[in-house]
Image (spheres, rainbow, N blue to C red):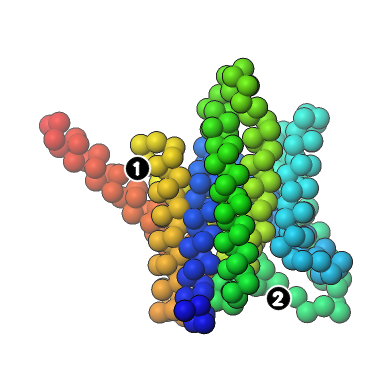
Amino acid sequence: MLDDFFVRALVAGIGIALIAGPLGCFVVWRRMAYFGDTMAHSALLGVALSFLFDINLTLGVFAVATLASLALLFLQRRGALSADALLGILSHSTLALGLVMVAFMSWIRIDLMGFLFGDILAVSKADIAVIVAGGIAVLGILALIWRSLLAGTVNPEIAEAEGLHPEKAKLVFMILMAAVIAIAMKIVGILLITSLLIIPAATARRFAPTPEAMALMASAAGALSVSGGLMASLQFDTPSGPSIVVAALMLFLLSLLRLKMQRAGGLNHDG
């Protein structure tokens, strides 16, 4: 079954979407979109270091993304700069360092466009195994910290008073984000990972009655975006990663249209 490259791409993309959905909800709730971008940009530095020291690419990206998130937490506690300034510095500096290092490593042939925008059609069975194993681990850990993380999102002080340790949950969440970025990098690319985290979650937010329902709906919206984007990519010969993000955007715009129609219907009914 998985011998067909398109089927492998579909399975891998849907797997990433199912993982990204619940995490993306917390990114939206906590207004951490720029943080997600920063971690994604740091992935290129992880790629460069992985090639330089000849280590596993996924592990290298995970390590650098985790270090970037820990550096952010440390600098935030020092209070020297505002959070958005720190994110801007980390985001652009890690991306620039990665690009400079790649340029210096002229003895290694690196597909920079593949890392930036992904190459989901080149996914192997081994990549799918990593996505499945990593996805089970990420979603399992997220389920364990869900209550603490949700309580800390709503009110950190009350969560702390109830002994839910929201700061620890936030730290674990950052590490889970690093893991997802490392796993998803080959699929949608460094520059598009954050889109797959944010857009399906933003789409689901308008319709979900509960946080848990929103997480499920975000995963479903992401899976639908992957399916639609890959079909469009095959039909119109467009880049697969960006096509998936465009499909996610179309779903989001449709959700806005449906919401507007519902409101209009409600006003007419009241009238």
Q: Is residue 22 visible?
A: yes
Is 249 displayed left or right of 163 in the figure? left
Label 2 element class: loop
| Residue that extends furthest to the top in the rendered view of this protein | 161
Which residue is rendered at x = 34% and y = 50% of the image?
Answer: 255
Tell me the distance, in whole angstroms, between the alpha carbons under discs 1 and 2: 40 Å
Which amino acid, mark 2? Asp
Give the position of the C terminus as an image quadrant.
top left
Which residue is rendered at x = 77% and y = 54% of the image?
Answer: 64
- Dot label at residue 157: none
Within-10-Å neighbours for mark 1: few <14, some 14–19, many 20+: few
Within-10-Å neighbours for mark 2: few <14, some 14–19, many 20+: few
Residue to which mark 1 is pinned? 207
Q: Position of residue 197 (x, y in %)?
A: 54, 52
Q: Is residue 200 visible?
A: no
CB under 8 Å between discs 1 and 2: no
Which residue is rendered at x = 54% and y = 32% of the image?
Answer: 147
Q: How many marks?
A: 2
Q: Position of residue 90 (x, y in %)?
A: 75, 47
- Dot label at residue 111: 2
Point out the tag, 1 or 2, that comes first from the N-terminus.
Answer: 2
Which amino acid, mark 1? Phe
Query: In the image, is residue 2 above or below residue 41?
Result: below
